[in-house]
Image (cartoon, rainbow, N blue to C red):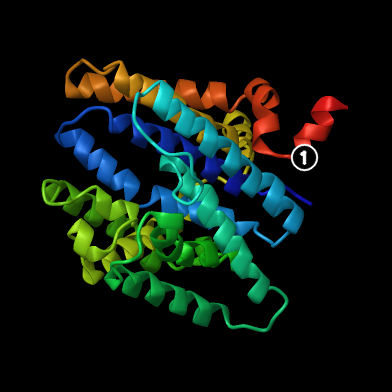
Amino acid sequence: MTRNFKIDNLKAMLIFLVVFGHLLECFYGNIQLWLYSVIYSFHMPAFVYTTGYFSRFDSKRYINALLYPYCIYQILYLLFQRFYLKEDNVLQFTTPYWLLWYLLSTMFWMLFLQFIEGKKLHSKAILIVSFLCALFIGYDNSIGYYLSLSRTIVLFPFYIAGYFRIFDHVEKMNKIRKTLCVGGIIFSSAAIWYFRNDIQNNWFYHALPYQKNGSSGFIRFMMLVLSFLWIAFLFLIVPSKEVKIISKLGKNTISIFLLHGFIIKIIDKTAFFHWNEIGNIIAALFLSIILCLILGSNITVKIFRITFNADRIKNFFS
């Protein structure tokens, strides 16, 4: 099977934005607020899209590559929170710690594939229904962080879109559509700057109902549309050819994703960012690159691979 370097390159760019976005949370400022909002307006939906892109239900992979690392890192992060961050918590697996919601949501998404794989179902109909569910679930005040249900439902359209690969031929769009896509990105980024003081960060998390995060169905609709627009734009600009270091990082995103949270929390606690806003942003940018290169290296993957996939256990002791 020929490797899809466009997806590898896209995943590398997105995991960099995940790290950079989390570092931006460590300090404040007008530019920081704008960058954070722009990044969060698309980077996780785009990541969900890439997750759906190669997804097929596989019970072995489900347990070894999703359930296993979720349990391992839920324990590790909760211990880290209690003993290093000195924050009280309870050891549990029903409310994922911080970034681990992604693994739990992926488990739910993959389970759903059992109902559509091998069946003659209209992809557009499934996508539309999932989109409507993402909008209406915000009116249910009982849905929130528990089992990552809100995020699972709201971001499901992007997983389904990736599963059906709806942007594979985006390069073939006519010039008018491409211009509208690019124009939409520029206009939305400018709008985010203009309304930066009115936009609430938790709108981008999709973790709470409208009543609890001050959002609305219209705001979520616009955010979902913007995210799809960004994904189309990324498929237009991300190269399809192998780009040595970048493509390599795209293959090792799991190690960066699961490990960088510890470092981010340590950096935040030590008040590392003590320069002016521009200095802090430049430092965060270079630090993000360094973290991605180190945590995404083959050496790091080899050291921690036993925690990423249960299949590695037997290889480790053999």
Q: Dot 1 corresponds to which residue?
A: 311
Type of the residue with mark 1 = Asp
Q: Is residue 170 above or below residue 313?
A: below
Residue 202 image position (x, y, % from top left): 26, 50
Tell me: residue 280, above or below residue 200.
Answer: above
Q: Is residue 127 above or below residue 286?
A: below
Residue located 38% across and 20% down the image: 266
List x then y, in percent, for residue 308. Answer: 65, 36
* Quadrant in the rendering for residue 232: bottom left
State the image quarter where residue 154 is shown.
bottom left
User: Which residue: 32% across, 60% down?
Assistant: 226
Name, please, the residue furthest toward the right.
Answer: 318
Residue placed most toward the observer, 184 or 250 = 250
Residue located at (56% from left, 61% from top): 108
Q: Is residue 80 left or right of residue 220?
A: right
Which quadrant: the C terminus?
top right
